[in-house]
Image (cartoon, coloured by chain):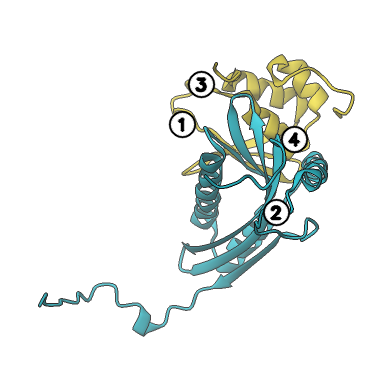
Amino acid sequence: MGATSLWWSDVKRMLDLCAGGWSEELKTHHRWIRFGGATWLKLPKGPGTGGRDYEMAAWQVRRMVEGLAISMKCAKTQLPALGPTKETDS
Amino acid sequence: MALSPFTLELDSIPLFFRYRDVVFGRGFAATIETTGRALCVREDDEFVMAGVEPGGMAVGGATREEAQAAFRKTFTEALFDIAAEAETFQAFKAEVERFVYQTAPATIDEWRRSVAASRLAVRDDVDVPRERADLPARVVVSHLELAPEQNRISEPELLVAA
């Protein structure tokens, strides 16, 4: 059984809608995502250059949303693969 | 096979980690001694080591041990990435402290729930290293003074096998 995965292009669209002002930096080892003064240092880089889309496991995105204190409700609306909305989602 | 320290299979195990790293940056070398917090959890069909402090990284693996090893490697890579861009030792130190102490409300809540569950499930008859759950994360970044007598990396030493 494979894990649920998401495309980087869809994740970026979610960030645009749910994390206004977010930015990204490609580092030597990982892709960093910054939002609201916090940094997520471990999003897969994929092919890195060339702008080609690539997939990542949904849990990686879910953890990033939590770690950057992005609205989980908003993220799940944009990316249903993150799981059903819970009452505790902000 | 080692006996599990828990009476049941926990979905989330709260862990402290202690790492010591040596990193070379632009014109400086530094030691980084870290006591951090992380959760080892099941996510889909993977085991994930998710940082609480530092709260900016989560790493997966096929087993708990794989996830823990990948987390260790990623932590050091993060330090390398920070060092690559820091203009000075002070800038590096400030960024490492920001990285280690960063956390998020949802992650802290998850840590508390995980600690409560593991306290109920921990076995008294298995001796495992434990730490107080309210121990704060701590990072000490020190300038590494390289003494000349310790810096002889290009002087080969030949020994005769006798």
Give the letter of the chain under mark 2. Answer: B
**Comparing marks 3 and 1, which lies closer to the viewer?**
3
Give the letter of the chain under mark 1. Answer: A
- Of residues B137 and B91, the one nearer the viewer is B137
The hue of chain A in the figure is yellow
First in residue order: circle 1 vs circle 4: 1
Q: Residue furthest right?
A: A87
- The part of the image, by quadrant, that contains residue B56 is top right
Check disc 3 and report the residue beneath it: A54
Q: Which mark is residue B125?
A: 2
- Dot 3 falls on a residue whose secondary structure is loop
**B140 up-or-down from A52: above or below:** below
Q: Residue at 71% of width from left, 37% of height from top?
A: B8
Q: CA distance from mark 2 to mark 3?
A: 48 Å
Q: Are marks 1 and 4 in one subunit?
A: yes
Q: CA distance from mark 3 to mark 1?
A: 10 Å
Check disc 1 and report the residue beneath it: A48
Give the letter of the chain under mark 4. Answer: A
